[in-house]
Image: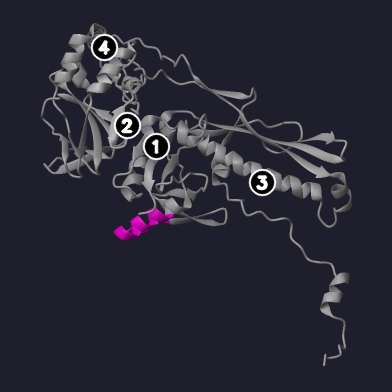
Amino acid sequence: MSEHRLTLDTRAARNLATTTKTVPQMQGRTPRWLLRLLPWEEARGGSYRVNRRLTYQVGDGIVTFVNDGARVRVIPAELAELPPLRDLGDPAVLEDMAGRFAQREYEPGEVIVRAGRPVDRVVLIAHGKVARLGRGEYGDETQLGVLADGRFLGERALLGSDEEWEHTVRALTPTIALVLPAADIGELTGRHAALEEHLAAYRDAPRPATDKNGEAAIDLAAGHEGEVELPGTYVDYDPSPREYELSVAQTRLRIHTRVADLYNDPMNQVEQQLRLTIEELLERQEHELINNRDFGLLHNADLRQRIPTRTGPPTPDDLDELLSRRRGSKFFLAHPRTIAAFGRECTRRGVYPGVIGRDGARVQTWRGVPIFPSDKIPISAAGTSSVLVLRTGSAEQGVVGLRRTGLEGEVRPGVSVRFTGVDDKAILTYLVSVYHSAAVLVPDALGVLENVEIAR
């Protein structure tokens, strides 16, 4: 027998109650640290030109390979990345040379070349990591750097020089290399007159005076006494400066007039639809600033500022190497899983990074430089990612964001909302646009630690 109710049922009472509700929520919203940390420059003309001193690029390219199963081959045209072969106009010569490279495989710890021996071969690192080793002040072995996929050594062997290897090179991981012995080089130059003439011209050409950064040198005198004749000089500029054009992320937001007219209490439907749309566009903006192949930071980093990890996972040594290659680093940017992997390496060594507060969040630091998370940095199928380090601001010759403000319908800097009309189905349409780009003012403003293993 059902119990007789003495009061109004709560389900019926809800029909007269006003529900307490939130504004629409979205799971995809992230802190967007990069957008908050980048200093923004105004690009009034829709583009931004970065003028630099003239820089001589010498041998900083990466050679590309293809493989058929376990057999690896170098793409002939990619041999032009070797400085002595640049501007060699005969593709048949590169094709013949590519076929002469022999594949060699090295186990971890195996020596590839030894210091003091003649430079009698060209070595291309197709896959794996190798270390350049030298002797410290007291005779102990010191690791001077790491070379990984696409790097090369011994290109001076093409010139028939009697130089010796300055450093011992040893495999850190299982390594596949392609080797061109001096005997094959001699046979190629004897067969191809164009190659012999090109190498002779390269050998005899005067080298432009450069400073330690590869920029055109400025002659000056210092520490002199008396009436010394001072050198004359001028500062040479890059004749083809990079111009960054503003990119755009856009969408059309559609809202039926019936919804906009009748369902605006207590929240304005148009405002909420625009808010969520702008949030999604800003997420896309940060993604583009990191991953766009034209101006994204991962692709815009100078090849000389991209370094591999020493052992795979992100270690304190790796982040120290990133910091040592530039002055005034403002912050690191890494995927949250990469930051977790770095924390594990620190714990394993008994090292505990500092923590600072930033905008209400607690952020891990290394050497006083904060490490901010960004899930826009990709993780490969093999479980590897990247760590970026930035010096920012035009006054510091760093990385700057680019945008255009003062737009028609601007709702926040660089974000425009324009009403484009009502169609014959009574649907309102708004054009929402975000204009943006990023510029690296000098190469050492941005560094990337590549192939970081986060799954180990």
Give the mark nearer the N terminus: 3 vs 4. Answer: 4
97 or 59: nearer the viewer: 97
Which residue corresponds to mark 1?
327
User: How many angstroms separate mark 3 from mark 2 (CA)?
Assistant: 39 Å
- Mark 1 or mark 4: which comes first in sequence? 4
**Main SS class of the magenta portion in the image:** helix
Q: Where does residue 299 sit, x and y in percent of width and height?
A: 46, 33
First of labels 2, 1 by sequence position? 2
Mark 3 nearby-residue class (10 Å; few <14, some 14–19, many ≥20): some
Where is mark 4, residue-wise?
202
Q: Is 52 on the left-hand or right-hand side of 77? A: right
Q: Nearer the viewer, mark 3 or mark 2?
A: 2
Give the image location of residue 296, x and y in percent.
51, 34
Q: What is the number of the mark on residue 165?
A: none
Could you say which quadrant of the image residue 159 lies in? Answer: top left
Local secondary structure at mark 2: loop
As helix, strand or loop, the secondary structure at mark 1 comes to loop
Local packing at callout 4 (Cα closer than 10 Å; few below 14, some 14-19, many 20+) is: some
Of the numbered discs in the image, which one, if any, rests on residue 279? 3
349 in the magenta segment:
yes
Q: Nearer the viewer, residue 293 or 48?
A: 293
First along the sequence among labels 3 and 2: 2
SS for tag 3?
helix
Residue at the disc numbered 2:
150
Give the mark nearest the N terminus, 1 or 3.
3
Vertical order, 84 against 107 (above or below): above
- Real-space Cα distance between discs 3 and 4? 55 Å
Q: Which residues are magenta?
A: 340-354
Left or right position of 399 against 255: left
Front of the two marks 4 and 2: 2
